[in-house]
Image (spheres, rainbow, N blue to C red):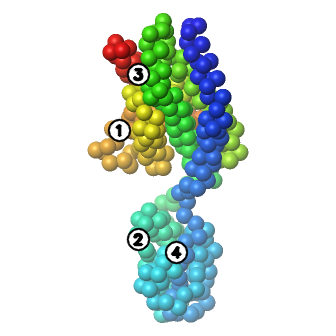
Amino acid sequence: MKRIIAQARKELTQTFRDRLTVALALVLPLILLALLGTALSLSVKGIPVVVQDYDRTPLSRQYAEALNASLTFHVVPSQLPAEAALASEQARAVIVIPQHFERDYLRGQTVEVQWLMDAVDANTANTMRGQAVSITNAFAAQRSGASAVKPAIKAETRMWYNPGGSARKFIGPGAFAVVLALFPPLLAALAMSREGEQKTILQVYVSSISAHEFLLGKIAGFFIIAVAEWALALLVAFPLFDLKIAGDPTPLLVGTVLYLFCNACFGVMVGVSIPNQAAAIQAVAGVQFLLSFLLSGFIFPVSNIPAGIRWISAIVPARYFIELVRDGFVRGGGWPAVWYAPLMLALLGALYFLKAWKKMRLMQVDA
């Protein structure tokens, strides 16, 4: 144990001796967290649309005003034809109100309003289509008043866990997990690969410290740094994303310890396997960060990932930590909801450590 503590103390001393490394460890995660959490947004607001009103009646103008009053659409003036307005990106949709719009409506006839949408961005187009139907139905229901035929089934919806539908409460916890997936393993990988690059690892081979003691000392040092990063990121995340503890916090705390251990083990494993700092950086950024960003459920649900590559998400630690963070800060389901996530993090951490230990033992024998 003394040799493990001594190794961890040595790593902390080397890290805090270099100001650039301290900035990389404690400041850059906060900047990345703020960028990821605020730059990414899944909500669609203020989409420019052009209304071509061929009726020019009070009712057609009220319909255009209803569109402009919504948060989703913003009516912009244009004299261009519909196709030209879309092609020039002056508008993302063109609404064509036909002649006799008001007359046919007052006669009780079906009135068709044409929506021409730019579907290059399919997600935004689908959102616009849903909002177009909702606004049109609400407009018709408001004008019909008491004479409207009541539907046989009326859906009453309530938003649970995130009543305001705030995108920040979805993106923020995910960004928190992705940031912690990058910097702790990056620092650990750099430290380990530097030992191999500068051949100082040979001193370890001929010393009395065993492979597992050396690795545990390294992991302990960068685990402490990771805890500091976690605490600072948490202080920023609470006010920035309007987060609060929801329900039992113990799954989140246990999962945090295992997630940080897992990431430190991954960095050490990469550093042992790749004795080159540039290559180690690329390995951590290309594997840990990209997989955490794309296959963890950070942006879109894991179930939406194509089945052929969905299995990869099962070995991405950030996937399980994101579930823990969102449960701890938003849903509050506690252990019954996320009991498996800490187990998977512990399993992945143990696999990374065993892989690093096996490689280290082989290098000692070869030396």
Residue 356 circle label: 3
Tell me what residue is drawn at x 60 percent, y 38 percent: 24
- Badge 1 marks a residue whose secondary structure is helix
Quick one: label 2 or label 4, which is nearer the N terminus?
A: 2
Is residue 232 shown above or below 273?
below
Report the mark closest to the observer, 3 or 4. 3
In the rendered image, residue 69, in percent from the top left (x then y), is placed at: 63, 74
Q: Which residue is mark 2?
A: 119
Report the residue marked by disc 1. Answer: 312
Which callout, 1 or 4, points to the residue nearer the camera? 1
Q: In this rendering, is residue 228 above or below 27? A: above
Q: CA distance from mark 3 to mark 1?
A: 21 Å
Say whether residue 249 is left or right of residue 271.
Answer: right
Alpha-carbon distance for marks 3 and 4? 61 Å
Q: Quadrant of the C terminus?
A: top left
User: Which comes before the other along the chain, label 3 or label 4?
Assistant: 4
Residue at the spot of label 4:
136
Q: Which comes sooner in the sequence, label 2 or label 1?
A: 2
Question: Can residue 327 be seen in this snapshot?
Answer: no
Looking at the image, is mark 1 or mark 4 earlier in the sequence? 4
Q: Residue at x 54, y 17 (%)?
A: 217
